[in-house]
Amino acid sequence: MDCGPDVVSDAWQRLDDELARWRDAGRSVEFWWRDDDAAQWTPALAQLLGLAQRFDIPLALAVVPASAEAALFAQLTDEICVLQHGVDHRNRSAAGAKRAEFACDERTEDAVARIGAGRARLAALAGARWTAAFAPPWNRLPEALAARLAEAGLRGLSRFGPRQRAQPAPGLVQVNAHVDLIAWRGDRGFVGVPAALEQAVRHLAARRTGRVDRDEPTGWLTHHLQHDAATWRFLEQLFERTRGAARVRWLPAPALFATGEA
Ligand SMILES: [Zn+2]
């Protein structure tokens, strides 16, 4: 991967150009930030929260209920929103299949009950920071189960990639992430500035031209436990460049997952 200074500055330029096209069309760009896999208070999580605070960017922290420690929540500032990241984050897929906590051979009733119990535990721990949205581990969830999340007390769903529908089920709003900073199939480090920004520009252009849902905010997905120095540096630059930029808004989770129902 060639990440020389020209390649990097060209990539930022392409993002700036795309943001300018939105401005020219009289539209605001909405971004949001989801970070997965929090459970314990770690130095990486402290660094993540420091970043959110320093740049005043709303952070949706997807926490694993079964392994969530109470000490974690004592450290969160009021601006952090807590989402539910699965229940125990254990892979239940058959050997060789793509990893998923919610594999198709678990009875839907059982999965709904597990999710509901996880939701209750996490909501109690998170208190006022709780946002009733579900981000399944590995972004995978059978449709039959998505349709029943409301029964488990959830009103939001977040997976990966442009959403097919804003409301996949009654009482459920879907807002996905679209930019993944980690090279999962590579060295599990940072994907690099060009690859990260390319994902964002591609989603923004697809929204602008109506090839995907125009109204789905572009979501940046991070995994604080995986971040190397380059990932942290990239996030700093991204926030520095976009925070306060004309017609760019970073949305907090409660605004994303509002169903319009009381
Ligand atoms: Zn995860």
Image (cartoon, grey):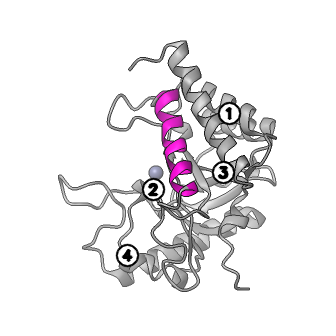
Give the distance between the C-alpha atoms of the residues marked 4 and 3, in whole angstroms. 26 Å
Disc 2 target residue: 161
User: Please, what is the dominant secondary structure of the magenta stretch?
Assistant: helix
Mark closest to the chain's N terminus, 2 or 3: 3
Disc 1 target residue: 47
**Residue 229 in view in this figure:** no
Q: Position of residue 136 (x, y in %)?
A: 46, 62
Q: Does residue 212 lie above or below 10 as drawn? A: below
Query: Disc 1 vs disc 2: which is toward the camera?
Result: 2
Disc 3 target residue: 31
Disc 4 target residue: 143
Q: Does residue 229 lie above or below 14 as drawn? A: above
Dot 4 amino acid type: Glu
Give the SS element for disc 2: loop
Q: Is residue 76 left or right of residue 87?
A: right
Q: Tell me the quarter of the image containing the N terminus.
A: top left
Observer-nearest of 6 and 124: 6
